[in-house]
């Protein structure tokens, strides 16, 4: 079951601009597994990050830009926070608000990473940032345990489109 929390009401005020608030959904492994087992022609970019991870924070705008530029090309970006669930309201929601993230943000509430990391990729040591790009219909999957920039994301994504 996905539990969503809307940031500080429905609308947030940034400078002179009113923007719609982003929801942060608290999910279990099952929701990610559902994405990985989809038989649709959607290409999913699943980025694993945390608010305390500087390389993760640096790459988030690139995922936002890919989501915006490829929204009409059957590409969906999901940014999965690896922060502790107890930090949702104190840390994750304020972070998402401050950085004005507009893409889908999930907080993975699965404390025992050893139960699911290998299901993402057997190459994954558990370090972040980490990114999985997958399209099950095309039987394509690529995994990165490193910081990615926009150009690298677009290059890798081109193999899926």
Image (cartoon, grey):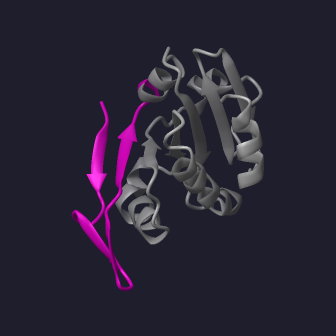
Q: Is residue 108 above or below residue 84?
A: above
Residue lying at the far left in this picture: please name it: 9
Whether the magenta-drawn stretch holds residue 39 is answered as: no
Whether the magenta-drawn stretch holds residue 26 is answered as: yes
Q: Where does residue 11 sit, x and y in percent of width and height?
A: 25, 68
Q: Where does residue 6 sit, x and y in percent of width and height?
A: 27, 56
Q: Where does residue 31 sit, x and y in percent of width and height?
A: 42, 28
Q: Where does residue 96 sit, x and y in percent of width and height?
A: 44, 62
The answer to whether 66 appears left or right of 89 in the picture is right
| Residue closest to the eye, 87 or 59 | 59
Q: Is residue 54 above or below residue 152?
A: below
Identify which residue is drawn at 30% across, 30% down. Answer: 1
Identify which residue is drawn at 77% across, 27% down. Answer: 123
Q: Is residue 15 visible?
A: yes
Residue lying at the far bottom in this picture: please name it: 16
Q: Which residues are magenta?
A: 1-30
Q: Is residue 130 above or below residue 21?
A: above
Q: Quadrant of residue 9?
A: bottom left
Identify which residue is drawn at 66% across, 23% down. Answer: 118
Q: Is residue 125 visible?
A: no
């Amino acid at each position: 079951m996905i539990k969503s929390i809307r940031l500080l009401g429905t609308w947030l005020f940034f400078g002179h601009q009113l923007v719609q608030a982003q929801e942060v959904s608290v999910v279990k492994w099952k929701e990610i597994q559902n994405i990985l087992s989809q038989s649709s022609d959607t290409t999913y970019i699943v980025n694993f990050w945390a608010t305390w991870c500087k390389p993760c924070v640096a790459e988030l705008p690139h995922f936002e830009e890919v989501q915006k530029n490829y929204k009409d090309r059957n590409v969906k970006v999901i940014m999965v926070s690896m922060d502790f669930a107890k930090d949702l309201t104190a840390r994750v929601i304020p972070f998402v608000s401050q950085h004005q993230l507009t893409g889908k943000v999930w907080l993975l509430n699965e404390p025992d990473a050893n139960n699911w990391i290998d299901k993402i990729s057997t190459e994954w040591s558990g370090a972040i940032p980490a990114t999985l790009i997958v399209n099950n219909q095309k039987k394509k999957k690529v995994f990165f345990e490193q910081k990615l920039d926009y150009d690298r994301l677009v290059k890798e994504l081109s193999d899926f489109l």
